[in-house]
Amino acid sequence: MADLIKQIDALRSEDIAETVAFVAAVPEHVNLAETTVLPTEQVI
């Protein structure tokens, strides 16, 4: 399993941090009801 994760572009903590920064930076008049972050590739 560890080898498979090395072969794909898995989500990293930086990806989530970038999303959080984006959500924190939206104007007050924007209501983000839900945010979903998914990898484009996934180990099954």
Image (spheres, grey):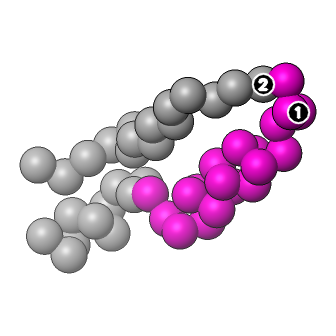
Camera-side residue of 28 and 8: 28
Label 1 residue SS: loop
Range shown magenta: 11-29
Residue type, mark 2 in image: Val
Residue visible at 64% across and 62% down in the picture: 17
Q: Residue 40's x, y, as percent?
A: 40, 38
Location of residue 36 with respect to 8 vertically, above or below: above
- Crowding at dot 1, Cα within 10 Å, few <14 / some 14-19 / many 20+, comes out as few
Residue type, mark 1 in image: Pro
Location of residue 32 with respect to 13 vertically, above or below: above
Camera-side residue of 10 and 8: 10
Marks 1 and 2 in Cβ contact (< 8 Å): yes
Q: What distance separates the C-alpha of mark 1 from that of mark 2?
A: 6 Å
Res. 3 image quadrant: bottom left
Residue visible at 58% across and 57% down in the picture: 15
On the picture, is 28 further left or further right than 6?
right
Q: Main secondary structure of the magenta part?
A: helix
- Crowding at dot 2, Cα within 10 Å, few <14 / some 14-19 / many 20+, comes out as few
- The total number of labels drawn is 2
Q: Residue furthest bottom?
A: 2
**Tag shown at residue 27:** 1
Residue visible at 85% across and 24% down in the picture: 29
Q: Residue 24's x, y, as percent?
A: 77, 49
Q: Say which quadrant the N terminus sits in.
A: bottom left
On the picture, is 36 further left or further right than 6?
right
**Tag shown at residue 13:** none
On the picture, is 3 further left or further right than 44?
right
Q: Which residue is mark 2?
A: 30
Q: Residue 25's x, y, as percent?
A: 84, 45
Q: Residue 44's x, y, as percent?
A: 11, 49
Res. 9 image quadrant: bottom left
Label 2 residue SS: loop
